Amino acid sequence: MSKNKGGFFLAGLLGALAGAVGGLLLAPKSGKETRKDIAKLASEISKRIKTETSETKERVRDVFGKATEDATDKYNEVKNAVVGKVASIRTAGEELDKDKYGKVVEGVVADFKDDFKSTKSGAEKIVTYLKKDWERMKKALS
């Protein structure tokens, strides 16, 4: 379980850092302060939108065909990259609506397509599941 938490945080942090470049260019704060804000927000969002273990296993089984530890880690890595992107968007002061969130999800999954050995339908399923998290995300951001 501690391995999962470490991977969860690391993936969230990596996603936050990837999206931070644009925020750094536009932010009135120093880069260090902005990165700190993004990491903090990503961590808070991750805690608020956490899905139940059984729900995550069901999603992983549907996307990857089986719920192995590697498949679960990959699902969480993609999910955390979405959280990181959302955190960097919000830290930059931009608003986030359902459509923009959907585009973030699609972009992140496109970045990960080669990483997880999934069919096109698997990638489509993970997009669908993560888009369904919009209500949780909206609540976490309020």
Image: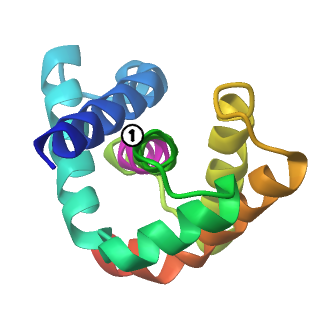
Q: Position of residue 79 (x, y in %)?
A: 47, 51
Q: Position of residue 18 (x, y in %)?
A: 45, 23
Considering only vertical position in the picture, is 54 above or below 115? below
Depth check: 117 or 93 in front?
Answer: 117
Q: Is residue 70 left or right of residue 2?
A: right
Q: Position of residue 100 (x, y in %)?
A: 65, 60
62 vs 91, left or right, is right
Along the line of sight, the residue nearer the viewer: 44 or 6: 6
Please tell me which residue lies in front, 133 or 21.
133
Q: Which residue is mark 1?
A: 88
Task: Tell me the magenta residue range.
Answer: 81-89
User: Visible in this render: residue 142?
Assistant: no
Q: In the image, is residue 129 above or below residue 14?
A: below
The quarter of the displayed image where residue 59 is located: bottom right
Q: Quadrant of the C terminus?
A: bottom left
Left or right side of 20 for 121: right
Residue 14: which quarter of the image?
top left
Q: Is residue 29 left or right of residue 106?
A: left
User: Magenta: predominant secondary structure element?
Assistant: helix
Judge whether 93 appears above or below 53 on screen.
above
Q: In the image, residue 73 lies at what x, y percent?
A: 41, 42
Element type at marker 1? helix
Residue furthest right as drawn: 120
What residue is drawn where x is 36% and y is 24%? 17
Q: Is residue 107 visible?
A: yes
User: Callout 1: 10 Å neighbours few (<14), some, many (20+)?
Assistant: many
What's under tag 1, amino acid-wise? Ser
Q: Describe the colour scheme in one phrase.
A: rainbow
